[in-house]
Amino acid sequence: MLAGELKDVRALFPALLRLPHRSCTGRRAIVTGAAQGIGLAVTQRLLQSGATVCLWDRDAELVEQAARDLAADGTVH
């Protein structure tokens, strides 16, 4: 799955989107495996909650693409 396929991630992990909303404004998070799958879904959820997120993944190209795709949703490093 590529980072550009964000709608597919939401379809695969709908339970993450049903979790109660908690504000993470002013908080920072590091997400490993953030370029795809569960890591990408967790990153989206954290950004929606206001967190600044640092993405880590062993696939450098894929994580850079994910960061570009997610930049509109919040602060991504």
Image (spheres, grey):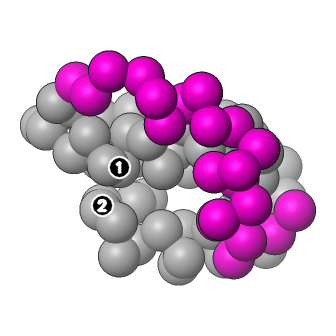
User: Is residue 77 positioned above or below 18 on the image?
Assistant: below
Relative image position of residue 1 (x, y in whole percent)? 87, 62
User: Is residue 32 positioned above or below 4 on the image?
Assistant: above
Q: Mark 1 and mark 2: span between their CA atoms?
A: 7 Å
Who is closer to the viewer here, 17 or 26?
17
The residue that label 2 is drawn on is: 75
Relative image position of residue 34 (x, y in whole percent)? 66, 47
First-in-chain label (1 vs 2): 1
Q: Is 2 a magenta residue?
A: yes
The residue that label 1 is drawn on is: 47
On screen, residue 58 versus residue 19, left or right, reads right
Q: Is residue 42 visible?
A: yes
Amino acid tagged 2:
Thr
Relative image position of residue 62 (x, y in whole percent)? 78, 68
On screen, residue 3 versus residue 18, left or right, reads right
User: Is residue 40 positioned above or below 5 on the image?
Assistant: above
Q: Give yes or no for contact between labels 1 and 2 (Cβ–Cβ under 8 Å).
A: yes
Relative image position of residue 8 (x, y in whole percent)? 74, 61
Kind of element beneath mark 1: helix
Quadrant of the rendering where the C terminus is positioned? bottom left
Q: For the magenta stretch, what is the residue range?
A: 1-22
Who is closer to the viewer here, 42 or 9?
9
Kind of element beneath mark 2: loop
**Which residue is rendered at x = 12% and y = 37% of the image?**
26
